[in-house]
């Protein structure tokens, strides 16, 4: 078991990301953005500099939090699909050099101008995700699907359907505790309730290889359709069922990673404060988030050991 996180929430530079990671006493980062770029878009010179800094610090990237097939890319768009493949092909050799075995991918955005899970559209989604996963499989990479604002994130049933239609040893689930909080449960008929993070987790838990830690609260929009804003908070303080999920994972022998994705800096930042203040808040809130989570995790471990 290990702790990691989207350290770009502590700072945009790799120096700040490494600093925050070492302050927490951790060895890993789930890389997403580095000075506005990512593993697929860094220049060769920037990538070599990055490799050197990681090596010198004794810090490693355990996962690439990519934008492949993410919530901003349309499942019907050939251009968006070509972009995902291009980003993937560019990332693979760099992942190999850095020893990264898994990338975070998705299953394309949930469309608004048609039913997001109609059979004809599902066929397209499954075909495209299968192709992306096959590229990963051929190159020794694991495609970890995150339940987010995407097809698989519509409900646990949609994730199970995705698993039924993407059969590969290179396909697994990354479970995000916070995303169900503000996404509708697309099961049954309209109006839809917001998802239960526990229900989602419980129904897919046997397929989970990695966990994103996020928490918050949300209230359904009055029209029952518009995705509500989420008020992010410390892990365990919201509706993400974080504590219950941790207990169940540990009881069942989970030994994978927990990756922090706080999103809390904006909550603590007054709009009247300057950019320097925001940067300081980002760093301090990320470190505090990690410390609080680690304390909660250790407390749960102790409680379970005492029983």
Image (tube, helix red, strand yellow):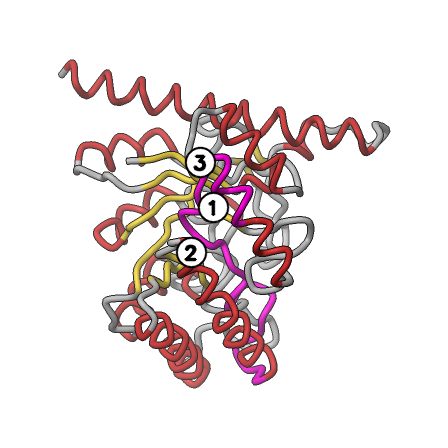
Residue 213 appears in the figure: no
The answer to whether residue 278 shows anywhere in this view is yes
Is 265 rendered above or below residue 181?
above
Q: Which residue is mark 3?
A: 58
Depth-wise, is mark 3 or mark 1 nearer the camera?
3
**Gap between marks 3 and 1, in whole Å?**
15 Å
Which residue is outermost to the left?
307
Q: Circle 2 sits on which residue?
A: 146
Estimate how packed mark 1 is, as few (under 14), some (14 to 19) or many (20 or more) residues with alpha carbons within 10 Å.
many
Residue linked to disc 1:
30
Q: Residue at x 57, y 55 (%)?
A: 48
Badge 2 marks a residue whose secondary structure is strand
- Placement of the N terminus among the 4 image quadrants: top left
Label located before the other in sequence (3 or 1): 1
User: What's the distance in space between the residues labelled 3 and 2, CA to CA?
Assistant: 28 Å
Counting other residues with Cα less than 10 Å from the Cα at mark 2, is it few (<14), some (14-19), or many (20 or more)? many
Q: Quadrant of the C terminus?
A: top left
């Amino acid at each position: 078991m290990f702790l990691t996180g989207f350290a770009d929430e502590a700072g945009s530079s790799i120096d700040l990301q490494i600093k925050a990671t070492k302050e927490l006493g951790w060895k890993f980062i789930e890389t997403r953005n580095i000075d506005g770029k990512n593993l697929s878009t860094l220049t060769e010179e920037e990538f070599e500099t990055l490799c050197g800094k990681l090596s010198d610090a004794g810090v490693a990237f355990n996962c690439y939090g990519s934008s492949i097939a993410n919530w901003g890319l349309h499942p019907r768009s050939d251009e968006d699909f070509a972009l995902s493949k291009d980003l993937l092909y560019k990332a693979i050799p760099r992942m190999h050099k850095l020893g990264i075995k898994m990338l975070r991918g998705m299953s394309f955005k949930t469309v608004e101008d048609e039913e997001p899970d109609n059979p004809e559209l599902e066929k397209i989604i499954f075909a495209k995700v299968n192709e992306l996963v096959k590229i990963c499989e051929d190159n020794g990479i694991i495609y970890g699907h995150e339940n987010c604002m995407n097809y698989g994130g519509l409900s646990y049933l949609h994730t199970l359907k995705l698993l039924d239609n993407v059969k590969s040893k290179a396909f697994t689930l990354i479970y995000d505790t916070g995303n169900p909080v503000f996404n509708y449960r697309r099961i049954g008929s309209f109006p839809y309730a917001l998802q239960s993070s526990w229900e989602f987790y419980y129904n897919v838990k046997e397929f989970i290889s990695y966990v994103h830690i996020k928490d918050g609260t949300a209230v359904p929009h009055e029209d029952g359709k518009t995705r509500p804003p989420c008020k992010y908070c410390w892990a365990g303080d919201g509706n993400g069922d974080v504590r219950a999920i941790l207990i169940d994972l540990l009881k069942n022998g989970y030994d994978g990673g927990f990756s922090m994705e706080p999103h809390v800096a904006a909550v603590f930042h007054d709009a009247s404060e300057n950019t320097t203040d925001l940067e300081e808040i980002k760093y301090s809130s990320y470190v505090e988030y990690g410390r609080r989570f680690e304390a909660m995790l250790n407390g749960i471990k102790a409680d379970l050991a005492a029983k």
